[in-house]
Image (spheres, grey):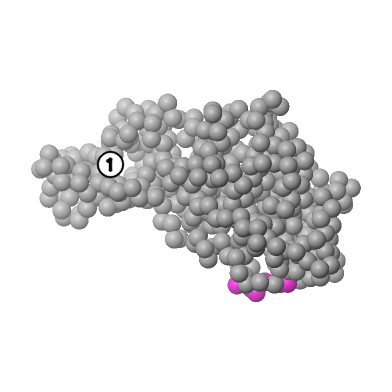
Amino acid sequence: MFTKVKKNSIEINILNSHDLSNFLNNHKEHQNWIHENDFKASPGQFLIIPSSDGQIEKILVGRSDSNDVYRDFFCYKLSKCLPNKSYHFSNLEEGSTLPYLSWALGFYSYNSSQKNNSKLYLPEKISKEVQNLVKSIFFTMDLINHPANVLTTENFAKTIREYFDDLGCKVHEISGKELIKKNLPLIYEVGKASDHPPRLIDIQWGKKNSKKITLIGKGVTFDTGGLDIKPSSGMLLMKKDMGGAANILGLASMLILNKVDINLRVLIPIVENSISGNSFRPGDILKSRNGTTVEIGNTDAEGRLILADSLTLADEENPEIIIDMATLTGAARVAMGPEIVPFFSTNKQIAATLQDLSFKVQDPVWQMPFFEPYGKWLNNDISDINNSPNTPFAGSIVAAEFLKKFIKNTETYLHFDVYSWNNGTNSNIPKGGAAQGIRAIYQLLVDHIKN
């Protein structure tokens, strides 16, 4: 994938449509070849320029000449197709990392051998950062791509423990009926019907006197919908209902591998929402960790329940920032589609900074509003709140308002309603499990710690 050796490598020349005209004027010997191959320097298009002895002289690759969202992701197809040789960028801006990440994504393959052995020279100055990002993103994508029979609640917990033990973290696990003893009743109730017991993973890393940041990810390994069962078409992608957890774990990996100076806590509630004689039911009234009673309006709105106890647990420490990610609502996809991650924030300044930053790092997120009047729709006659009020409107906002009710102490709270999947709409990254929003959040936290 990468090499530290630049010597004898083949140059990759990056061109946009304007650059191509200058290149043709300065390399008349290549004009016919370029025209015959209809190379227009369109984003991601590439052309091998042969030398007189039949070897490769150089590679031309197209890049957008406008400020496109994915402008630097022009190497995804390139790395998949080039002959197995060593290459280097001849005219990339110093310090630019995204083209290298794009190159690496072309190598990603879930559960199959990678046939491409081409190498790209990675400058020493950015080598560690790039490789840490690649490792974290591949970890996220692998987790999401695992089928539910592989990533059971037990195996998910084991995978997390092994990965973060290797990074020097303290990893604690609460499982089964121990959740009730530890006052995490909603996590237990959602997951109790499965043969694979529910659990909470608690990861801690960093210095206690550093800024306290807590990350939470929804880890539903498979979601049948419970007794409010989904149609078969609605279950096809439900192995990815732990995508919020996978993305949070990838974000945590980035922070730890790059040794960001924070006091980090990561909470991952893990359940399988199954159907059995002891499934929680529509109309049940459940008590949460903080004493709030919740009537179950729909068992398919289970993610917000396991997050509620986790948010309460996190909030008890009053960290500087709480961030959660969850594949929570279809309404978020209707609002933003599959590529833009909608988020909600109680901190206007951080929200504005993050939204702008996300487009700079080409990992787009977009702020949606907390709206208290919609939060009142959760109010209930026979319990404090209902987990899924009977309204067809503003599903993503209502879910966010539900979660916010479990934040009592922490001033800065951000909730991300992430899709965690690329069904092919984004041709710049692999199909399947997707790392979304976490590079933007990572950069936000790095900048926040510095300031």
**Residue 71, relative to residue 400: is it above or below?**
above
Residue plotted at (50% across, 50% down): 365
Is 223 in front, or is 411? 411
What's the residue at 84%, 57% (across, down)? Answer: 287
User: Is residue 231 highlighted in magenta?
Assistant: yes
Left or right: 421 in relation to 18: right
- Residue 273: % across, % down: 74, 62
Q: Position of residue 308 (x, y in %)?
A: 74, 53
Q: Which residues are magenta?
A: 228-233
Q: Quadrant of residue 417?
A: bottom right
Residue 19 left/right relative to 113: left
Q: Is residue 359 magenta?
A: no
Q: Nearer the viewer, residue 311 or 43?
A: 311
Asked whether residue 113 appears in the rendered view, the answer is no
- Residue at the front extreme of this rendering: 373
Write the residue at 75% across / 64% down: 379
Question: In the drawing, does residue 392 fall left or right of residue 435?
Answer: right
Q: Is residue 168 above or below residue 406?
A: above
**Farthest-out residue, bottom:** 231
The N terminus appears in which quarter of the rendering?
top left
Kind of residue sitting beneath label 1 = Ile
Predominant SS along the magenta part: loop
In terms of depth relative to the viewer, which is nearer, 443 or 75? 443
Secondary structure under the numbered disc 1 in the rendered image? strand
Residue at label 1? 14
Q: Quadrant of the C terminus?
A: top right
**Is there any visible trace of residue 450 in the rendered image?**
yes
Q: Nearer the viewer, residue 404 or 250?
A: 404
Q: What percent of the width, then of the height, locates residue 404?
A: 69, 52
